[in-house]
Amino acid sequence: MIEPIMTKLSIDVLDTVLADEIIYAEVAGSGAMGNSGGITIYLIKAGQLVCYETSLFSDENTYLGAERLLFKHQNTYKHNDIKTDKILFDFYYGGMGNSVFVNKNVSLKIGDGYFIYNRNNIEYQIFSSVHGVFDSVVYAMKGSENNLN
C-alpha cells in the first residue's frame, strides 16, 4: 500500500491542478473541528499519490482558490455564491464544518481508518484529516452506495 507524498499547495501549483484529476478532497471552514481552516487535495502526479495541503490562516488566496475549484464542481451544497460548473464530485458532509469531495469516476474501498484508491493494480492510501470525518463519510457513502466497493 502506497502512502501519499505530502506537499504544500500554492497558487502556482493550484493553477496546474485539473479538477477531474482530483480523487478526494476536504475543505474545513475556519471554525471546523479537526483541520480547522485547512484544505487537502489528493491526486496522482507522475505516478505518485500526492496530498496537497493549504490553510486559510497561512495562505488565504490559495485556500479560497482551492475552495472555489472544489465547490464549483459539485451540486449538492451551495457555497458563497459559487456557481456550479461541470459536476465532477460527490459531496459529503464530514461533520463539524468539514466538506468532502470524491471524484464521481473513482471507487474507494474502506481500509482501517483510511480509504483505498486502486489504480492500475496499485493501492494508494487516502487519509481523512481526522477520524470523525472518515467515519462520517463512510456512513454517508454506505447509505448512498456511491463510490464505495
Image (cartoon, helix red, strand yellow):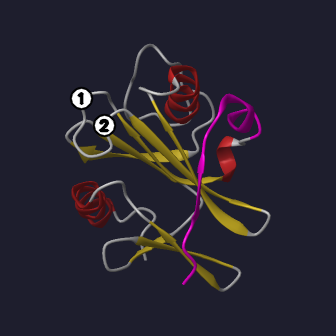
Depth order, front residue of 45/93: 45
Identify the residue at the far front of this view: 58
The local crowd at label 2, few if under 14, some if 14 to 19, many if 20 or more residues have their Cα within 10 Å, is some
Specify whether residue 54 is painted magenta. no
Secondary structure found at label 1: loop
Return the x and y of residue 102 as percentages of the image width and height. Answer: 48, 53
Residue found at x 30% / y 57%: 137
Return the x and y of residue 123 as percentages of the image width and height. Answer: 57, 81
Question: Which three-letter amino acid code belongs to the residue tagged 1?
Answer: Gly
Identify the residue at the far top of this view: 81
Residue found at x 39% / y 24%: 78
Q: Tell me where residue 9 sits by quadrant.
A: top right
Quadrant of the rendering where the C terminus is positioned: bottom left
Return the x and y of residue 35 as percentages of the image width and height. Answer: 33, 44
Q: Are marks 1 and 2 in contact (CB under 8 Å)?
A: yes
Depth order, front residue of 35/82: 35
- What residue did someone put label 1 on? 31
Q: Is residue 29 above or below residue 40?
A: above
Specify whether residue 8 is painted magenta. yes
Question: Which three-letter amino acid code belongs to the residue tagged 2?
Answer: Ser
> Which of disc 2 and disc 1 is earlier in sequence?
1
Q: Is residue 49 above or below residue 60?
A: below
Report how far apart the C-alphas of labels 1 and 2 lie in the structure.
6 Å
Depth order, front residue of 5/101: 5
The local crowd at label 1, few if under 14, some if 14 to 19, many if 20 or more residues have their Cα within 10 Å, is few
- What residue did someone put label 2 on? 36
Depth order, front residue of 10/126: 10
Q: Which residues are magenta?
A: 1-16
